[in-house]
Image (cartoon, grey):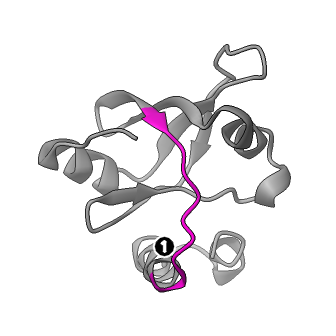
Amino acid sequence: MATWTSEELTKIGTAEELELASLRRDGTLRKPVTIWVVRVGDGLYVRPIYGRTSAWFRGTQVHHEGRIQAGGVDKDVTFMEEADPGLNDQIDAAYRTKYRRYAASIISTTV
């Protein structure tokens, strides 16, 4: 898992969007996708707007590694699924707060 500095957490967590490139089966990076990102505590979280069938998400389930870029930070990362229901509720709330200016129908695809 990536180790974050306070500055990286702030820069990425406050960025409107994040560029995410997961790995293909052959180990090369996929073309980056633009996705929303939220910060909860010392963690950064992304969710697939089109669900678990999104190509980039499927890539994270095979290799669990990739690269992100946001807020001037470019970093190799490890993808992990969050299993804590309490933390998932906090992530939902962070998405609703950060992106509330967008239609509820869009937000509901990520929370």
Front in this rendered view, residue 64 or 22: 64
Q: Position of residue 90 (x, y in %)?
A: 43, 81
Q: Position of residue 5 (x, y in %)?
A: 17, 43
The residue at which mark 1 appears reads as 95
Q: Is residue 33 above or below residue 105?
A: above
Q: Is residue 44 visible?
A: yes
Answer left or right for 59 relative to 20: right
- Disc 1 residue type (three-letter): Tyr
Outermost residue to the right? 53
Query: What is the crowding at mark 1: few (fewer than 14 residues within 10 Å), some, or many (at least 20)?
Result: many
Q: Chief secondary structure of the magenta span?
A: loop
Determine the residue positioned at 72% across, 71% down.
109
Determine the residue positioned at 54% across, 65% down.
82
Q: Position of residue 98 (x, y in %)?
A: 40, 71
Answer left or right for 53 relative to 22: right
* Location of residue 39 by image quarter: bottom left
Label 1: state its secondary structure. Answer: helix
Answer left or right for 90 relative to 65: left
Query: Looking at the figure, which quarter contains the N terminus?
Result: top left
Q: Is residue 81 above or below residue 72?
A: below
Query: Looking at the figure, which quarter contains the C terminus?
Result: bottom right
Front in this rendered view, residue 55 or 85: 85
* Location of residue 110 by image quarter: bottom right
Q: Is residue 50 visible?
A: no
Q: Is residue 97 above or below residue 64?
A: below
Answer left or right for 35 relative to 9: right
| First to last magenta residue range | 77-86
Outermost residue to the left? 6
Determine the residue positioned at 44% across, 34% down.
77
Q: Position of residue 104 (x, y in %)?
A: 64, 82
Give yes or no for residue 37 being in the magenta stretch: no
